[in-house]
Image (cartoon, rainbow, N blue to C red):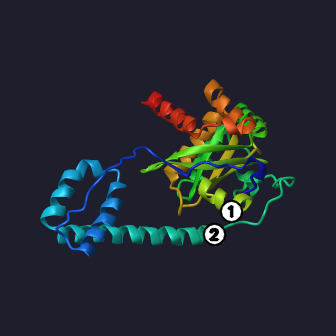
Amino acid sequence: MAIPLQNAIRLPLLISRNIFVGTNNCNKRYIMTTCTKLEKVLENLEKNPFFDKYAKKIAKLQQTNPEEFLQRVEKEEEKIQRKREKQEEEYKYYEGQAKPYLKQSKQPEKAKLNSIMKIDMIQDKTKDEIINIWKEYHKDKDYICGILMPEQFNKMFERGKQYSTFLLPLPRKEGYEFIVSQFCGLEIHMTPLLWYQTHKENAPECLTLVHYIEFKDEKGIVLMRGEFDKKYINVQEAQCLVNELQLYYCTDNIKRLELLKIFTNKPNEFKHMDLIAQLESIQLELQ
């Protein structure tokens, strides 16, 4: 993913919705090794967002049955360790997926619709028929697809020339993860901020959007196809990123346009929390 290095992005990967802080003291009647172990366990527990909710129950169990308390926590630590090992495996996978450097001066070849389906078989179909065929064709495939009207497409890619790189917040269970997006030719490439920070311009992609313009003039539609990495995002998350992208690049919302301008022209003034606030305001509007 070729992202200009001069526009280095230095934002935290994950913004947590809730942060809790607690305090505790070790009971002196326990032997030294147990006390030390309990201190470490409780220190880890305080980092859990649900610590305040269960603090009294934890304290009671700690005092009445410290051995059972430790056994329960050790089981949880084993789960965390397994999760950490899984994340390390995923890291190695993505590290192996890092791509060769793509020079900024070199644009990718224009995607050809004929490479994935026979155009001559649908050339004489109506616009609505082609839309239905396109959707049906991708129904059971590991892709997302969409249709853009020429005015939408033109606005998106004209704006993409001005603001070629941007951040999109992706909702996660723990908070929000930032995804870096970049326009390149008729393609839009997306990669997690973590992988961009690790691999820079060689970062592997989690979503790639390709646009086919063969029917743009004759039928008045542009066909879009998105290929996503199932190991990192699911189909709903891929669609969420596409929807966010279109809200910034296909509509004329003043606040969203201002965020594009600040990110591109005044990066030192850019605030990532503004992206989250904007996304949450959109969700409230939909509700």
Q: What's the residue type where badge 1 is placed? A: His
Which quarter shows the N terminus? bottom right
Seen in the picture, residue 223 relative to 232 is either above or below; the reply is above
Would you name the residue on which mark 1 appears? 199
The image quadrant that residue 271 belongs to is: top right
Q: Which of 91 and 26 is in front in this view?
A: 26
Q: What residue type is labelled 2?
A: Glu
Mark 2: few, some, or many residues within 10 Å (few <14, many ≥20)?
some
Q: Is residue 219 visible?
A: no
Could you tell me if the residues under marks 1 and 2 are in contact, i.e. CB atoms within 8 Å?
yes
Residue 203 visible in image: yes
Instruction: Say which residue label 2 marks.
Output: 95
Residue 207 x, y percent position in the rendering: 62, 54
Q: Position of residue 186 (x, y in %)?
A: 76, 47
Q: Residue furthest left?
A: 64
Position above or below: 103 against 183 = below
Judged from this view, the residue extending furthest toward the right is 105
* Quarter of image, res 124: top right
Q: Where in the figure is residue 23, as x and y percent of width and height?
A: 30, 52
Q: Earlier in the sequence, mark 1 or mark 2?
A: 2
Numbered disc 1: secondary structure: helix
In the image, 207 versus 2, the foreground residue is 2
User: In the rendered view, would you say 26 is above or below 7?
Assistant: below
Q: Is residue 83 left or right of residue 273?
A: left
